[in-house]
Amino acid sequence: MRKLSAFLSVSLDGYFADRHGRMDWAKAGADDEEFAAFSADNSRNASNLIFGRVTFEMMASFWPTDEAKKAFPEVAEGMRRSHKYVFSRSMAQDPPWHNSRHLKGGLAEEIRAMKAEPGDNMVILGSGSLVAQLAPLGLIDEYQMVVVPVALGAGKTMFEGMKENLKLKLAMSRTFLNGRVLLSYRP
């Protein structure tokens, strides 16, 4: 059975998107050499990326560009090579980004089916609304958060709307020189 993890940047006050739905604040300090090496290493290992429409469109507008290929060549290549699945009821057609597939079915049912298939593990990348829907169902095997040293004051949390507590255990942590902290939790 394939595992599903969630990987998101969050602010010190726990938001993955600011009060306007933007995530550009998460880029601050990302050009740090140590963090850039971590990101490049992660991109080599990712092969099945899961997105909601908003995050997918944001990623698709940057990673295939010449600017991305020049600034972050290893990450851009990893993003191109990875299989990308976007969940959306409003997307009208299949996305043109290389190795991308539009999934229109029910999120939980599709994820259960994908987890049961043989193959590489899957990562929800930056799509907090998907995390909020899947976490209460116990379908996420690991939560990885990069805490960015910024406070937003308001925004969206990845656990928004949960009715019961989600108990997690710290599996790993890493502090970067730029002040970011990677936290990995498992149910």
Image (cartoon, grey):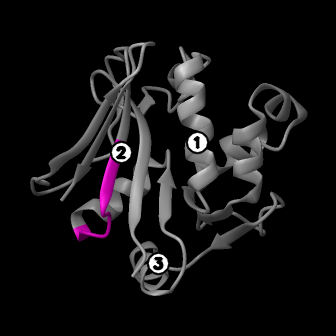
Point out the tag, 3 or 2, that comes first from the N-terminus: 3
Can residue 76 be seen from the camera position used here? yes
Tell me: 86 left or right of 159: right
Rendered-image quadrant of the C terminus: bottom left
Q: Position of residue 126 (x, y in %)?
A: 50, 44
Q: Is disc 1 placed on a helix, strand or loop? A: helix
Tell me: 179 left or right of 37: left
Mark 2 residue type: Gln
Magenta segment: 137-144
Does 142 sit above or below residue 146? Answer: below
Q: Residues within 10 Å of mark 1 (few under 14, many from 20)?
A: some
Farthest residue to the right: give it. 66
Q: Is disc 3 placed on a helix, strand or loop? A: loop
Q: Residue at x 59, y 75 (%)?
A: 104
Q: Position of residue 70 (x, y in %)?
A: 85, 28
Q: Position of residue 151 (x, y in %)?
A: 34, 15
Mark 1 residue type: Asp
Does 125 sit above or below residue 14? Answer: below
Mark 3 residue type: Gly
Camera-nearest residue between 185 and 91? 185
Question: Which residue has dot 1 on it?
Answer: 41
Question: Which residue has dot 3 on it?
Answer: 106
Point out the tag, 3 or 1, that comes first from the N-terminus: 1
Give me the C-alpha separation between circle 3 and circle 1: 32 Å
